[in-house]
Image (spheres, helix red, strand yellow):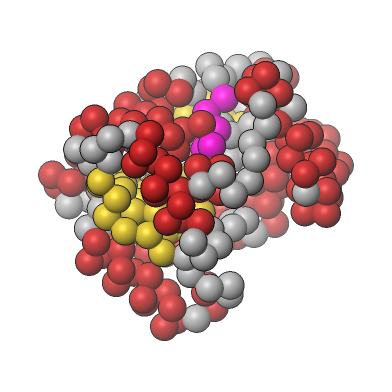
Amino acid sequence: MTKVRILNTDVDNVTMEEAVDAVRTIAIRNRSCGGSSYVVTPNLDHLVNLEDDPGFAEAYRGAELVLPDGVSILLIARYLGTPLKEKVSGSDLFPKVCEMAAEKGLSLFILGASPGVAERAAANLCAQNPGLRIAGTYSPPWGFEEDAGEIRKIVNLVTEANPDILTVALGDMKGEKFLCSHASEMNVPVSLSLGAAVDFAAREKKRAPAWVSKAGFEWLYRSIQEPRRIGARVIKDIRRLPGLIVKYRRGARPR
């Protein structure tokens, strides 16, 4: 699978169909050999945070799949002369992975989101995908990442549930760091850090209309919905982008 260097990280140059197939292949491979891998979905905010957070950068280096989440990644890649095939957002990937899991008999554990949200997401996804097996759900409390006992509880819950696929929605950068530290310990064949995908599946948050997303303005739609959190972050990231392009322009090469 071809990787393309986009500023400070290597991104897999795949279509959505290829990404889903890769998740299936990794899950089956690691189930048979006892391995464990995880997937991250970078957006512009991730590229900015990779500059400032060594732990986050370490998590990215450990990922087997790095999928371009957001039109900003595609635009940057095109500007650098290394265009990507397609946007593979976590919010679009999640339901397609669930569809694939139902067809292939793979089980799923949903970790994260607010209390009750993971359960509602699981119910909706099972209704949409007859035969989908949910191995378990759990929503850890706020600040779990600082609580060794809570982390041990999460690891034990997932390990005992023994899913084929783990979906993680733990908040900004927390999911990637958690998987970097504990994916191999939980021995899940493949784990996906997918951000707001669980909220959307639960219908906890309203997603942008398809035409808005296709046009590349989902970030604007979410900024209007959550101006203090998403809007402020977008402004910060756009301000940092020119400096990142100047810094990494010569290093953008396919690998």
* Residue 85 in view (yes/no): yes
Tell how many labels: 0
255 or 242, which lies in front? 242
* Residue 22 in view (yes/no): no
Residue 127 lies, in percent from the top left, at 36, 38
207 vs 182: above or below: above
233 or 185, which lies in front? 233
Residue 176 lies, in percent from the top left, at 50, 55
247 or 232, which lies in front? 232
Residue range highlighted in magenta: 87-91
Judge left or right: residue 95 versus residue 254.
left
Q: Main secondary structure of the magenta part?
A: loop
The answer to which image quadrant residue 235 occupies is top right
Residue 189 lies, in percent from the top left, at 26, 48
Report the quarter where the N terminus lies: top left
Q: Is residue 250 magenta?
A: no
94 vs 16: above or below: below
Q: At 42% from the left edge and 43% from the top edge, which residue is drawn?
A: 124
The answer to which image quadrant residue 71 occupies is top right
Q: At 53% from the left edge and 73% from the top edge, which residue is drawn?
A: 141
Q: Is residue 88 magenta?
A: yes
Q: At 54% from the left edge and 37% from the top edge, which residue is drawn?
A: 91
Judge left or right: residue 74 versus residue 19.
right
Judge left or right: residue 110 versus residue 251.
left
Q: At 54% from the left edge and 78% from the top edge, which residue is drawn?
A: 146
Residue 116 lies, in percent from the top left, at 49, 61
